[in-house]
Amino acid sequence: MTALDDPLLATRPSERSAGPVHQRPAPSRSTASRSGQKWSRLIHVYASMIAFTVVLLFAFTGLMLNHPTWTLGDEANITVSTGELPVELYLDDGALDYLTLSEFARNELGANGEVTSFGEAGGSASIVYANPGYTADLVVDIETSTYEFSAEQQGWVAVLSDFHTGTDTGGAWSWAVDAAAIFLIVVSLSGIVLQFFLRKRRRSAYVSAAAGSAIIVGLIVVALM
């Protein structure tokens, strides 16, 4: 009987058989959880720090807008001046040169800010200037060439409040408001995601968020009634 015919050989492990195949274990759920928690925390923290000043500004000015009588002792300063326009401000046909008139208002009368409107109506010509917390009007009697210039400079509370509403702040600040809104959205969503990875506080955090949302919705409904 040959070795190939020996039935005992069938029970022996083959010397040529390959050893056990070792596979790399799949990432555990705890590893993925730690990674998600890490990134959500980083996004939440740095977005919060970047938006810190803007959030503080909007919080303070929102409070002041809700209580317009709170001036904190910073009252408005109103100035009025009158006079007669020099002939150099008129064109050859007798019409007012608004560009030269505006330069006169800025250099001689102290007007500042952007020109929001100008034109003639009812025998008078006018130019209106505006800046955050500041308005000025130059009104000219076309027949007599006399003018009245009035300017109102609000206090710093009103200036900051105009930045809150974006009133007369220009295009650059409009972009800043958009960026602040995006950062606030990121802070809110990253905070919600971060709580998902904190198992001990997850339920209480989501219950608190739901309760706060319900209160806000309820106040909106009451205000609309």
Image (cartoon, helix red, strand yellow):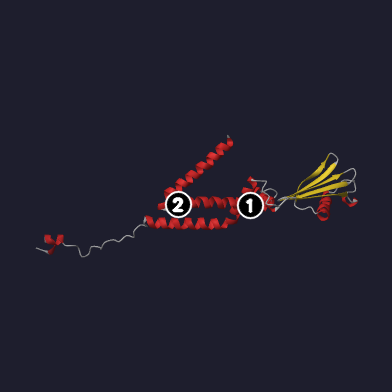
Give how far across and how far down residue 24 sits, in percent: 34, 60
Give how far across and how far down residue 210 sits, in percent: 47, 44
The quadrant of the rendering that contains the C terminus is top right
Q: Residues within 10 Å of mark 1 (few under 14, many from 20)?
A: few
Q: Nearer the viewer, residue 69 or 148?
A: 69
| Side (left or right) of 53 relative to 136 | left
The quadrant of the rendering that contains the N terminus is bottom left
Q: How far is the residue under mark 1 from the one under mark 2?
A: 31 Å
Q: Name the residue type under label 2.
A: Gln
Tag shown at residue 175: 1
In the structure shown, which secondary structural element does the residue marked by tag 2 occupy? helix
Give how far across and how far down residue 37 sits, in percent: 44, 56
- Direction top: furthest residue: 225
Q: Earlier in the sequence, mark 1 or mark 2?
A: 1
- Direction front: furthest residue: 73
Q: Which residue is mark 2?
A: 195
